Image (cartoon, rainbow, N blue to C red):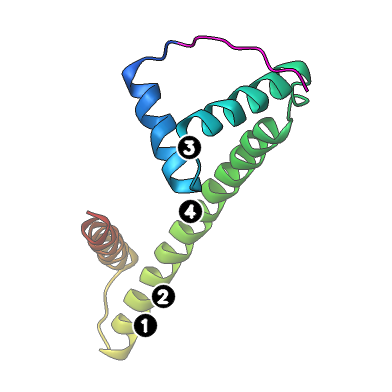
Amino acid sequence: MRLVRHTVRLPVSLDKALRSLAEQQGVSVYAMLQRSVKAGVATLAAPPAPSTAPQEIVTELASVSTRIVDVERVLDRALFTACAAYCYARSAALGMRTDDEAVTAEVNAAYERQRQLSREKRQ
């Protein structure tokens, strides 16, 4: 095989990267430069086919995001229902003769307390 000589000028940062790679692989800087040129020419000659993976990932993330919003709504409703059940059960257990407006106010207060506690835990 006949070899051709070329002079190559590299920026300092690229030279450092080349030397680091050569050291990692246990070869000379010149051998690493030759490998890099071969890999670069091969890649440019036959570029990889464009991948649809990034678009698929974006689509799946959008789907997951939509589902998370739905789950948050269901959990929020479940929290409100649990607060209502607790307040009505407490009222009944204590034998309090309170009207629905008073219990509703307790439910809303309990619900807001629980939401505030969950916000504090996130921060």
Residue that numbered label 3 is attached to: 28
User: For the residues carrying marks 4 and 1, which lies nearer the camera in this image?
Assistant: 4
Residue that numbered label 1 is attached to: 89
Q: CA distance from mark 3 to mark 1?
A: 79 Å
Q: Secondary structure at mark 1?
A: helix
Q: Secondary structure at mark 3?
A: loop
Dominant secondary-structure state across the stretch colored magenta: loop
Amino acid marked by disc 4: Glu
Q: CA distance from mark 4 to mark 2?
A: 20 Å
Amino acid marked by disc 2: Ala
Pointer 2 or 3: first along the chain: 3
Please state, as top left, top right, bottom left or bottom right, where the C terminus lies in the image.
bottom left
Residue that numbered label 2 is attached to: 85
Residue 26 lies, in percent from the top left, at 48, 47
Pointer 4 and pointer 3: residues touching (CB < 8 Å)? no
Residue that numbered label 4 is attached to: 72
Give the extent of the magenta segment: 1-8
Pointer 4 or 1: first along the chain: 4
Tell me, yes or no, whether the highlighted magenta stretch contains residue 69.
Answer: no
Q: CA distance from mark 4 to mark 3?
A: 58 Å
Amino acid marked by disc 3: Ser
Pointer 2 and pointer 1: residues touching (CB < 8 Å)? yes
Q: CA distance from mark 2 to mark 3?
A: 75 Å
- Crowd around label 4: few <14 · some 14–19 · many ≥20 (10 Å): few
- The reply, left or right, for residue 26 in relation to residue 42 is left
